[in-house]
Amino acid sequence: VCSEGFGAACTSPRSQTRATASSFYTIPSFDTNPGKWESKPSLPQVPQVPQVHPEVEHRSFLNLQVSIMRAMNLANLDVGSSDPYVVCTIPGQLKEVSRTEVVMNSLNPEWNQTFHIEHYPVTGSLLFTVWDKDTFTKDDFLGQALVLTSDFYPKAFRGNLPLTGCPDEQEAYLQVSIEVTRSGLDL
């Protein structure tokens, strides 16, 4: 049974996570069986510090170019090897910003995919979540990395992000590049 609203807790036979309860909270989502709920790992609780004066915060935005190059040393959760993909979201917004293609049978996948984000909030952050694609069950969580605006603005970021919450405490990394292509700061 789930209470209503975003971030609501659910209880059902399908509610499972592979990480500790302290690193995730439950978000209800529909699966292919109407009336059933499942739990998905979600973002860590990270305080957001305003980076501009509150009076101009609503007029402050950035346009970004984000490249997801590769992941290294992912956990193997399948028979054979994992089939990883990455989902990028802005915490606090319900829709995903982008999703890479699935790379079949790889613990060190290469995507080299670039996408653009328009009107990214200056006080925001980017959450990169790595999943293992499964055909007959829900996708498995492989790890996540949170990047604050201060990590790539005003200077661009290119490097390896350590993934947190990995199964069996696997030490894995995601290589990304983030640069500002336009600034809409009305200071």
Image: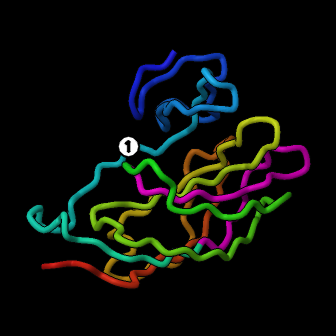
Q: Secondary structure at mark 1?
A: loop
Q: Position of residue 104 (x, y in %)?
A: 83, 59
For image coordinates 59% across by 31% down, the residue present is 30
Tally the marks. Answer: 1
Above or below: residue 140 compared with residue 122: above
For image coordinates 65% across by 16% down, the residue present is 13
Q: Name the quadrant of the C terminus.
A: bottom left
Which quadrant holds residue 11? top right
Q: Position of residue 51 (x, y in %)?
A: 21, 66
Residue at the left extreme, as displayed = 55
Amino acid on which the number 1 mark rests in the picture: Gln
Q: In the figure, is residue 178 to the left or right of 57? A: right
Residue 84 in magenta stretch: yes
Q: Report the magenta residues as a range.
A: 68-91
Rendering colour mode: rainbow
Q: Position of residue 25 (x, y in %)?
A: 47, 33
Residue holding disc 1: 45
Q: In the figure, is residue 83 to the left or right of 92? A: right
Q: Nearer the viewer, residue 17 or 181?
A: 181
Above or below: residue 29 compared with residue 180: above
For image coordinates 65% across by 32% down, the residue present is 31
Q: Nearer the viewer, residue 58 or 112?
A: 58
Residue 16 in magenta stretch: no
